[in-house]
Image (tube, rainbow, N blue to C red):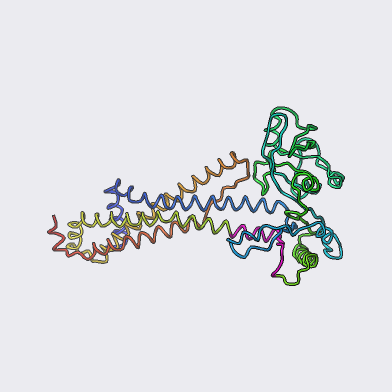
């Protein structure tokens, strides 16, 4: 038998039992669809997160209190009160960090904001006037607080769109006073909706001078984070190293392994987030691939049934001159065709669902969620589906090839 004849025979064998063939590849279709869906959405999420990180500027450096975590379970290292005002003074010294462009200490907390009878649980974000420039924030109403407000610990606040909606309904918030922790704060600006697509959800935040938040709301004398910018992108690494040396001197640390702070550049953060999201995506894809194994077992069972039902056909083919290799090739090709067709359908279905879900997420979350066609997932799906056909179709094909033509012709 020629390969062309084997292929035609395999197609005819599959088309004879269309319902069975469709049900047989269902497991493969579900598995490949799940893999495509997970990989595509994972790539979209990764693109969104990295876009937000890079949106802060590639020359941004962050200092976080506490040593760098040594393991996923090392949570205690993420908390601390090691960043103080003396560190800001030391970092602002040009002789210590010559390429520093700007520095912004920040504090973070949460409390209930109220206006008349309306209340809203809001996040408190204390910073300097540089927050508008660093995070590229442009109020839809009013203006940001100024340097004088930071120096004088002024009772002024910039509120997000959700805070404005919950507290003021249809009333204009500008110039009104909201109460947080029993203290009145004048609303000087309102931010437009961001959709929560940023690393910080400014929609639900109340932004104010960090001195005000420290003194009147949080009651702390340390910072939760210090955000800096170098003069140019090329000076980020050298500036980050200068920051480490300056803070070690400020904290009297001689052993780098004893650091009570963590310095991160945007590239560091982007690399870590890429590693985390990629690992999570491929883990979920591996879980989804279990359906492929189930589909493979189903194919082997159906092929074994097919071999039994077509015993007389096998005997007749052998009697007419077909070799064991011809029979083996025919049934093996049928299995591979089943899984390959299932793989192609799964790729089309999975990528289509991913595209639709990406559009929905973009509309619902109001974020720039990009659809990403996972070429790696598609290639992996085709290769794996073909291998499943070879592996799980091999045993039934071998059983068919080993049948005796005389016994096969006697089979009822």
Q: Residue furthest top?
A: 170
Q: In which quarter of the image is the C terminus?
A: bottom left
Instruction: Where is residue 45? Give x, y as percent.
Output: 58, 50
Left or right of 396? Residue 213 is right
Q: Residue at x 17, y 57 (%)?
A: 312
The image quarter in which residue 112 lies: top right
Q: Residue at x 48, y 55 (%)?
A: 285
Q: Quadrant of the N terminus?
A: bottom left
Check if residue 258 falls in the magenta segment.
yes
Q: Which residue is drawn at 12% across and 59% down?
A: 410
- Say which of 109 and 380 sits in front: 109
Residue 360 vs 393, above or below: the answer is above
Q: Residue at x 22, y 64 (%)?
A: 322
Instruction: Where is residue 365? Give x, y as percent.
Output: 60, 41
- What secondary structure characterizes most of the magenta part? helix
The image quarter in which residue 188 lies: top right
Residue 398 vs 36, above or below: the answer is below
- Say which of 226 and 253 sits in front: 253
Residue 52 vs 2, above or below: the answer is above
Q: Where does the magenta region start and end?
A: 257-275
Check if residue 303 falls in the magenta segment.
no
Instruction: Where is residue 127? Give x, y as percent.
Output: 78, 48
Left or right of 158? Residue 376 is left
Q: Which residue lies furthest to the bottom in this view?
A: 255
Q: Which residue lies furthest to the left in this view?
A: 410
């Amino acid at each position: 038998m020629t390969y062309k004849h084997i292929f035609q025979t395999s197609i005819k064998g599959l088309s004879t039992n269309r319902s069975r063939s469709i049900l047989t590849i269902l497991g493969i279709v579900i598995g490949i669809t799940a893999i495509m869906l997970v990989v595509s959405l994972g790539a979209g999420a990764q693109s969104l997160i990295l876009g937000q990180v890079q949106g802060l500027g590639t020359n941004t450096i962050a200092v976080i209190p506490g040593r760098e975590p040594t393991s996923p379970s090392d949570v205690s290292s993420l908390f601390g009160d090691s960043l103080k005002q003396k560190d800001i003074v030391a970092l602002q010294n040009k002789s210590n960090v010559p390429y520093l462009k700007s520095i912004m200490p920040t504090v973070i907390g949460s409390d209930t904001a109220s206006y008349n009878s309306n209340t809203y649980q809001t996040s408190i974000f204390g910073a300097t006037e540089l927050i508008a420039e660093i995070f590229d924030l442009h109020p839809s109403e009013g203006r940001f607080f100024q340097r004088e407000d930071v120096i004088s610990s002024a009772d002024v606040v910039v509120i997000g769109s959700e805070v404005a909606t919950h507290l003021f309904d249809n009333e204009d918030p500008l110039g009104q006073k909201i109460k947080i922790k029993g203290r009145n704060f004048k609303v000087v600006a309102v931010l437009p909706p961001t959709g929560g697509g940023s690393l910080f959800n400014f929609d639900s935040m109340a932004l104010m001078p960090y001195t005000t938040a420290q003194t009147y709301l949080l009651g702390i004398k340390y910072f939760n984070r210090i955000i800096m910018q170098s003069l140019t992108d090329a000076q980020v690494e050298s500036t980050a190293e200068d920051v480490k040396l300056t803070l070690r001197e400020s904290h009297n640390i001689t052993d780098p392994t004893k650091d009570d702070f963590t310095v991160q550049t945007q590239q560091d953060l982007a690399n870590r987030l890429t590693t985390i999201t990629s690992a999570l995506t491929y883990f979920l894809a591996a879980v989804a691939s279990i359906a492929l194994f189930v589909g493979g077992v189903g194919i082997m069972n159906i092929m074994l049934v097919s071999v039994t039902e077509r015993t007389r056909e096998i005997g007749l083919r052998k009697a007419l001159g077909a070799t064991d290799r011809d029979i083996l090739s025919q049934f093996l090709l049928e299995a591979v065709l089943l899984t390959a067709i299932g793989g192609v359908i799964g790729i089309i279905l999975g990528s289509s669902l991913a595209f639709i879900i990406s559009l929905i997420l973009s509309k619902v979350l109001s974020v720039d969620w990009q659809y990403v066609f996972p070429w790696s997932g598609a290639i992996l799906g085709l290769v794996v589906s073909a291998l499943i056909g070879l592996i799980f179709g091999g045993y039934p094909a071998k059983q068919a090839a080993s049948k005796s033509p005389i016994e096969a012709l006697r089979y009822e």
